[in-house]
Amino acid sequence: MHRTALLLALLLPLLAHAAPDAAACVAVHGSTAQGEGAEAARAVFRQCALREYGASAEPRIEACTADLYTLPVILLYRSDGLSRAEALADMKRDAQLDDGSDEARRAPRMLDFAYQGAGPVAGKSEAWIRQRVNEWTDRCLRGLVSK
C-alpha cells in the first residue's frame, strides 16, 4: 500500500499535465483580446503556449497567434454552407491570398483543414468553430502545420 501511494504521488503530476491544453490558450487569448486588446492577448497566449507546450513551441507561437484571427473567418465559409471552391473564390476575390503575408501563405492550408471531416451540425456552428480552432492551434503549436 505504501509503495502504491508513493508511485501515485510521483505519477499524478505527470499525468495531470500529460496533454497540452490548446483550448486553455485559445480561451485566455480570446478573453484578454476582448478586455485588454491584441497586444496583451498575444502576450498571454505566448505565456500559455510556453507553459503548455514548452520551449519547442517558441518558433511557432507568432504564426499560431495570427491563425487565431484568420482561421475562424475561414471556418465561417464552411459553417455558412459554402463549398470549398466557393470559399476559395471568395478569398481570391477579396485578395486575401495575394498580399504575400505569412497569413496569406497559410490560408490555403487553413481552408483545407476547414473542409476536412464533418461540418457543423445545424445550430452548433459556434461550438464547431471553437473545437476546430482548438484542434488547429494544438497542431500548430506542436509543429504539425507546415509553413
Image: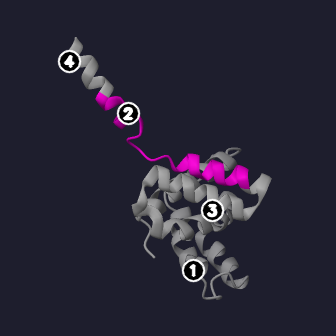
- Kindly identify which numbered label has been placed on residue 36: none
Which residue lies under the disc numbered 2?
Answer: 13
Q: Is residue 76 above or below residue 147?
A: above
Tell me how far mark 1 sits from mark 3, CA to CA.
Answer: 13 Å
Q: Earlier in the sequence, mark 1 or mark 3?
A: 3
Q: Nearer the viewer, residue 145 or 128?
A: 145
Q: Earlier in the sequence, mark 2 or mark 1?
A: 2
Closer to viewer: mark 2 or mark 1: 2
Tell me how far mark 1 sits from mark 4, CA to CA.
Answer: 53 Å
Q: Nearer the viewer, residue 132 or 80?
A: 132
SS of the residue under disc 3: helix
Which residue lies under the disc numbered 1?
Answer: 102
State left or right for residue 69 relative to residue 16: right
Is the C-beta separation of discs 3 and 2 under 8 Å?
A: no
Which residue lies under the disc numbered 4?
Answer: 3
Tell me how far mark 3 sits from mark 2, CA to CA.
Answer: 30 Å
Tell me how far mark 4 sits from mark 2, CA to CA.
Answer: 17 Å
Amino acid marked by disc 4 = Arg
Amino acid marked by disc 2 = Pro
